[in-house]
Image: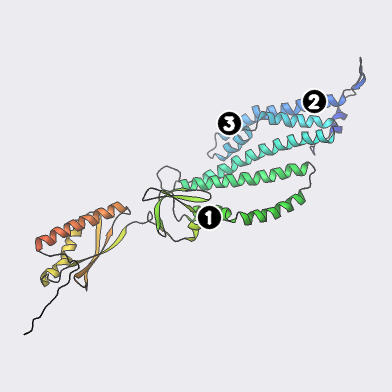
Amino acid sequence: MFDYFSATAITDLLPAMTYTLPFLGEVNLLKPAAALVVFLSLTFLFWLLRIVILHRIKSLASKTKGDFDDVLVGAVENVRAWVYTLVALYASLQFFTFSDLVDKVFTFVFLFSIVWQTIEIITGLVNYFATNFLEKDEDGDGKIDPNSANASNLVSLISRILLWSLGILFVLSNLGIEVTSLLAGLGIGGIAIAFALQGVLSDLFASFSIYFDKPFRIGDFIVIGTDSGTVERIGIKTTRIRTLQGEELVISNAELTTARVQNFKKMRERRIVTKFGITYETPQDLVHNVPGIVTRIFESLEGGRLDRVHFTSFGDSALIFEIVYFVESSEYAQYLNIQQSFNFDLMKQFAELGIEFAYPTQTIYTKSSN
């Protein structure tokens, strides 16, 4: 029923239409005529809205700088024509009296269509805001960050579920079904379902936490405990990681939010600590020259920056030197290339100077007695 529509007011505006027809006798055509007037009037108004008014508003919206008005016009423009016809038909049928079953069927079809079309409009607006405020180009490469796209899809999915839940309750309430007890039952059932699905729900909210906190993104190389790999996908429940061995590692989002995660993609440079040893038989002047040799090697290494080199300790079978240097890249392969170049140059320099690398040895001294 339309609150603003009064069948009596419409019929009072029309003249008496009681006629005597063959075989039918005296027939009152006032209600059918009023219903036809209402149907044609509403159909004309809806046609005027779609063809004339909406076209004019669309023309004005295209001249503005923002695009939100274009989205609003598009939402109204996308309302199906049969929905307008259904509204006009339902209004015209209010002049007649039907059985409760037929009346409930008509009301259900009408309300469900209106609710469905309303949800489509609101969902379009939610998608617009989610796309504009959540989907961002984090890296500046012209591509939408997959993490933000996932968050946008989650917001759209949750909003659609909530809208349909409210819409169904609205339809049931207008059909005369008591929804208070239904809501109470759903509340108790919701608590039971929440306990049963607490793992799934915790993963769902963890996915939002991952998006807003951004501990890592798709494409980052991360380490979780003993596992490591490149993040390929962040879903509603799980995150997929491609390990160095090639297999796919699936980890729940809730576990990721409670675990200690090392993100190597965020690293600007690597700090490397390494050691080597030379033999005790090395002359003292050559031992003094080792730090200078290491310094000169790093001066010629592109992408590597020496922090310090020191003779740190006397080992069981070697004189131990410790080197700390930085690789000016987050790429693991670049670190290995610099380490390899340094090792080759160090071996060459030591070979030219006669300095030998130490390895585990034992010297046995024997003493003879008469």
Q: Which residue is mark 3?
A: 59
Q: Mark 1 packing: few (<14 Cα in 10 Å), some, or many (20+)? A: many
Identify the amino acid type marked 3: Ser
Q: Residue at x 80, y 25 (%)?
A: 36
Q: Farthest residue in the bottom direction? A: 370
Q: Which mark is residue 206?
A: 1
Q: Quadrant of residue 292?
A: bottom left
In this picture, residue 120 sits left or right of residue 255: right
- Percent coordinates x, y for residue 4 in the rendering: 79, 38
Q: Position of residue 347 (x, y in %)?
A: 16, 59
Q: Nearer the viewer, mark 1 or mark 3?
A: 1
Q: Is residue 303 above or below residue 110?
A: below
Distance of mark 1 from mark 3, alpha carbons? Answer: 44 Å
Question: Which amino acid lies under the numbered mark 2 shown in the image of this protein?
Answer: Val
According to the picture, the residue beneath numbered tag 2 turns out to be: 37
Residue that extends furthest to the left in the rendered view of this protein:
370
Q: Are marks 1 and 2 in contact (CB under 8 Å)?
A: no
Amino acid type for the residue under numbered disc 1? Ala
Which mark sits nearer the N-terminus, 2 or 3? 2
Q: Mark 1 to mark 2: distance in Å?
A: 57 Å
In-front residue for pair 2/311: 311
The foreground one among 275 and 360 is 360
Left-right relation of 183 to 33: left
Residue that protrudes farthest toward the top in the picture = 22
